[in-house]
Amino acid sequence: MSDVEKIYQYLKEADVYYLATVEGNRPCVRPFSTVKVYEGKLYILTGKKKDVYEQLMVNPNAEIAVMGKDTWIHVIGTMKLDERPEPLAAIEADYPGFAVKYNQDETSPNAVFYFDTGKAIVSSWNTEPVVWYL
C-alpha cells in the first residue's frame, strides 16, 4: 500500500478530519469529510463559493489533523486545484449527497484540490513518529 493510500485510509477511518488553510495572517480550521485517492494523489472536495476555496486559491499551504484511537495524523503540504471533470466526478460519486445538494445545472459548483507536495506524520504517546509522503 502506498503512503498516499495509508493517509487516505487513516482519514476515512476517522470519518471527520480538520483542514487548516490560511487567510491573510491567520489560520482557518474547519471539519471536513470528503477525501479520495485519484491517480495516486490525495484529493478533497469543496464548494467554489466556500471560503476554503478562495483561501487555497490565494495561498495553497494547508494542513490536516485528526485523532485516531491511539494515534494522530498531521498532514502538511501544498494543495493544487484540479479543474478536470474526471477527478471531480470520481469524488462526487463517493459523496453523492454533495452532488445532489449542490448540482442545480450542468456546471458543478464543486471543486477538487489535491496535495501537490507534502508529508503526513503519524504520532502516538508511546512510539516514535512515522512519516508518510504525499
Image: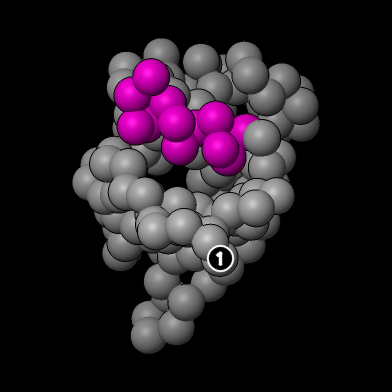
Q: Is residue 6 above or below residue 113?
A: above
Q: Residue furthest bottom?
A: 25
Quarter of the image where the C terminus is located: top left
x and y percentages locating residue 91 in the rendered image? 54, 22
Q: Is residue 78 visible?
A: yes
Disc 1 marks a residue whose amino acid type is Trp
Query: Which residue is pictured at 56% across the width and 65% down the height?
Result: 125
What is the span of residues highlighted in magenta in the rendered image? Answer: 1-12
Q: Is residue 107 visible?
A: no
Q: Label 1, on which residue?
A: 125
Quarter of the image where the N terminus is located: top left
Q: Is residue 3 above or below residue 28?
A: above
Q: Is residue 61 above or below residue 32?
A: below
Front residue of this view, candidates 72 and 24: 72
Tell me which corner region of the image, top left, top right, bottom left or bottom right, holds residue 51: bottom right
Query: Which residue is pictured at 39% across the width and 58% down the height?
Result: 128
Front residue of this view, candidates 46 and 71: 71
Query: Which residue is pictured at 44% across the width and 83% down the height?
Result: 26
Prevailing SS of the magenta stretch: helix
Q: Is residue 58 magenta?
A: no
Crowding at dot 1, Cα within 10 Å, few <14 / some 14-19 / many 20+, comes out as few
x and y percentages locating residue 118 in the rendered image? 26, 50
Q: Is residue 3 magenta?
A: yes
Query: Which residue is pictured at 63% across the width and 62% down the height?
Result: 30
**SS for callout 1:** loop
**As drawn, is 67 to the left or to the right of 117?**
right
Front residue of this view, candidates 8 and 87: 8
x and y percentages locating residue 106 in the rendered image? 57, 18
Tell me which corner region of the image, top left, top right, bottom left or bottom right, holds residue 87: top left
**As drawn, is 94 to the left or to the right of 40?**
right
